[in-house]
Image: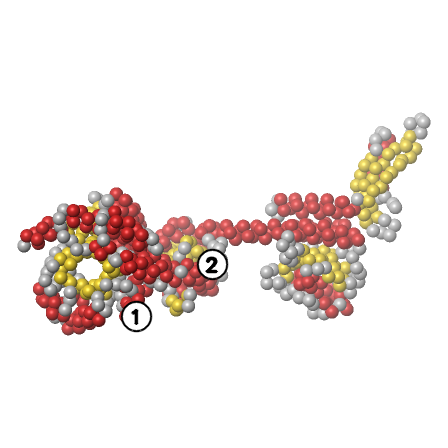
């Protein structure tokens, strides 16, 4: 075995002459021309006069160790330095080719759909790698596609005549590639995310050196691929919404800032659309969380399908999405919004129910409405909130006036939260009287709010606010507690009040603990279930939440009366009405208005009282303000009346005075 000593002979001679041994690691060649790594230890031999007369050299073949050391060092260092996966794989191929110049190394990635994609092949023509991109794996997909398909090494020692190369040899043979040995790269779970291959320019089989090179390389490539997949998974978790797969808030800001910078450089426009799914909570409550998730995925899929190449789609929160449209100004935006509305509101089957989504959209434009993406998104959000308040299912552009409106609404929401805890709310009570003899039938409790700074705030304003900000359930429970407390106090003071009616929202009936809560409140004030009436609106008819009907029946079985408020104005359905355990219907005031002059209203009120009688329900007429209305309703057979003709809603002390005066009369 010869050493390539000429390159360092002078250095070796000087060191040996000084009596020092010389150690080195060098590439050497064997007699048959194979390259190996050698570790040499050369010791000097001196004669009696101290002259260097010879040397004794020990050569050790360290190729196996060196392969692992060199490959591991270069690849791990590249990974530590956060080099791209392609760069890491290219390093592996080049180092392997340094050990074995007779081979051409290649690394392919296999995607989840079973298609191969080149990662590195520094010694192969780029045109060849491009031709392999996207090729499906299979039993006859060359060496690499077959190895990935079978999950085991595949040697094609003669590409020209191997049937597994029949469809691909026209790519390899013109390049002088005659043989290929491919080994699957396996993950820790046994999956095959890639392949490592050696190409040869002559028909042949791998040598022991080649086998060792592949053994080490495949292990390190698997590590690099798993690391890349872990990083991709972390990026997915950090920057993408897990339900819809859309970019989340963080990635939206990154991409939108880049888009805004590009638009600014070109002095062009950009639009931001803030999209909210109307009544999404009702979908969740009625059809279940799974149905809500399905609806969100449908919205996301439709937006993703509609977007242009430069557009950005993101899911901001539970039921809110953001569209960023670069190069879209005031001339194009209205048409774009109409397209989005038409797309998103198309009917869709959700949980076996045909559902027509409703969306509200807020719009802001660069540069007029803001200079940075945070401001533009915030202002589009404000415009969306205004659109929802004005009319759900519409859209609105941002205007400076919306700032003050949004601030006022936020202040009002905070004030309502405080009022629920510090006693800022109070109940007024409106009497209900029997039409046949004028007896007091009961009282309806109505929430009122007087703010020390804002003054009187109408229920028309704060009830929808409570629904929007999630306080409506808490508001209902507060009214129930306060009404029962007040009823007990009146009775202790000798005032006869047969019953008190409290309005509850459908949200309250989603709570399976409501019956227990009612029992605790009644017991704590010494009241009976029959002393309480709960008024529900017709929206409960559309509520398919399984807990709603269960809770309604549980409350009914307690002995608490149930009344259907505003009957005839919403989703009236006789089939639904039969399922509900109600004892009372309330004719909405809109049917009482102009009753004496409107034949249609008289016909409708007549129909409602007949329906009530057929179902053995007490029917209460609301909004009676004149003697003519009083007379007509009495003639039609109505049982109970409520309205300004008898009394306006009164604060508790005024109601007590009204009761005492009535008793004296």
Residue shown at 66% from the left, 52% from the top? 222
Q: Is residue 314 left or right of residue 86?
A: left
The crowd level at tag 1 (other Cα within 10 Å; few <14, some 14-19, many 20+) is few
Q: Secondary structure at mark 1?
A: helix
Q: Is residue 379 left or right of residue 2?
A: left
The residue identified by callout 1 is 575
Looking at the image, tell me whether mark 2 or mark 1 is earlier in sequence order.
Answer: 2
Q: Please tell me whether mark 2 or mark 1 is closer to you in this view.
A: 1
The answer to whether residue 335 is visible is: no
Tell me how the rendering is colored.
Answer: secondary structure
User: What's the mark number on residue 244?
Assistant: 2
The outermost residue toward the top is 49
Q: Secondary structure at mark 2?
A: loop
The outermost residue toward the right is 48
Which quadrant of the structure image shows residue 498? bottom left
User: Is 12 situated above or below 658?
Assistant: above
The answer to whether residue 627 is visible is: yes
> x%, y% of residue 127?
67, 62
């Amino acid at each position: 075995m010869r050493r390539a000593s000429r390159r360092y002979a002078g250095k070796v001679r000087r060191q040996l002459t000084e009596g020092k041994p010389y150690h080195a690691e060098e590439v050497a060649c064997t007699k048959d021309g194979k390259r190996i790594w050698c570790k040499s230890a050369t010791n000097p031999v001196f004669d009696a006069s101290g002259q260097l007369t010879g040397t004794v050299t020990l050569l050790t073949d360290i190729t196996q160790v060196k392969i692992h050391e060199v490959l591991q060092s270069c690849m791990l260092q590249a990974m530590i330095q956060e080099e791209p996966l392609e760069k890491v794989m290219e390093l592996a191929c080049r180092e392997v080719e340094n050990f074995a110049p007779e081979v051409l190394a290649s690394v392919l990635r296999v995607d989840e759909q079973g298609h191969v994609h080149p990662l590195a092949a520094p010694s192969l023509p780029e045109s060849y790698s491009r031709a392999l991109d996207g090729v499906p794996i299979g039993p006859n997909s060359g060496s690499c596609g077959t190895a990935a398909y079978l999950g085991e090494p595949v040697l094609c020692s003669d590409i020209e005549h191997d049937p597994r190369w029949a469809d691909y040899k026209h790519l390899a043979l013109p390049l002088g590639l005659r043989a290929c040995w491919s080994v699957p790269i396996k993950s820790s779970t046994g999956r095959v995310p890639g392949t490592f291959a050696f190409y040869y320019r002559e028909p042949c089989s791998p040598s022991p050196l080649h086998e060792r090179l592949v053994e080490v390389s495949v292990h390190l490539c698997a590590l690099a691929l798993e690391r890349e997949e872990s990083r991709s998974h972390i990026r997915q978790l950090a920057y993408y919404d897990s339900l819809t797969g859309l970019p989340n808030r963080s990635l939206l800001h990154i991409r939108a800032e880049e888009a805004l910078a590009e638009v600014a450089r070109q002095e062009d426009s950009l639009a931001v659309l803030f999209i909210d799914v109307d009544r999404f909570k009702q979908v969740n409550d009625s059809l279940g969380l799974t149905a809500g998730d399905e609806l969100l995925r449908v919205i996301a899929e439709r937006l993703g399908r509609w977007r242009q190449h430069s557009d950005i789609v993101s899911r901001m929160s539970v039921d809110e999405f953001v569209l960023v449209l670069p190069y879209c100004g005031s001339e194009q935006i209205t048409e774009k919004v109409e397209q989005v509305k038409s797309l998103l509101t198309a009917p869709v089957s959700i949980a076996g129910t045909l559902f027509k989504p409703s969306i509200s959209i807020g719009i802001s434009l660069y540069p007029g409405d803001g200079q940075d993406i945070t401001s533009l998104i915030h202002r589009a959000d404000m415009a969306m909130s205004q659109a929802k308040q004005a009319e759900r299912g519409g859209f609105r552009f941002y205007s400076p006036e919306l700032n003050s409106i949004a601030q006022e609404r936020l202040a009002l929401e905070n004030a309502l939260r405080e009022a629920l805890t510090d006693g800022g709310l109070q109940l007024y009570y409106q009497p209900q009287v029997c039409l046949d003899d004028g007896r007091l039938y009961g009282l309806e409790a109505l929430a009122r709010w007087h703010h020390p700074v804002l003054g009187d705030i109408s229920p028309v304003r704060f009830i929808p606010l409570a629904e929007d900000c999630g306080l409506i359930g808490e508001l209902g429970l507060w009214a129930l507690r306060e009404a029962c407390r007040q009823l007990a106090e009146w009775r202790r003071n000798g005032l006869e009040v047969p019953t008190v009616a409290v309005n509850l929202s459908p949200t309250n009936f989603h709570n399976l603990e409501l019956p227990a809560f009612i029992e605790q409140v009644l017991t704590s004030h010494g009241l009976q279930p029959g002393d309480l009436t709960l008024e529900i609106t017709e929206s409960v008819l559309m509520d398919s939440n399984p807990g709603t009907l269960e809770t309604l029946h549980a409350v009914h079985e307690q002995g608490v009366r149930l009344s259907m408020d505003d009957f005839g104005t919403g989703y009236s359905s006789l089939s639904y009405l039969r399922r509900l355990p109600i004892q009372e219907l309330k004719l909405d005031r809109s049917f009482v208005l102009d009753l004496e002059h409107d034949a249609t209203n008289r016909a409708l009120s007549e129909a409602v009282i007949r329906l009530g009688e057929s179902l053995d329900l007490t029917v209460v007429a609301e909004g009676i303000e004149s003697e003519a209305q009083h007379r007509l309703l009495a003639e039609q057979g109505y049982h109970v009346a409520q309205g300004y003709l008898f009394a306006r809603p009164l604060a508790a002390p005024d109601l007590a005075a009204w009761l005492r005066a009535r008793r004296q009369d």
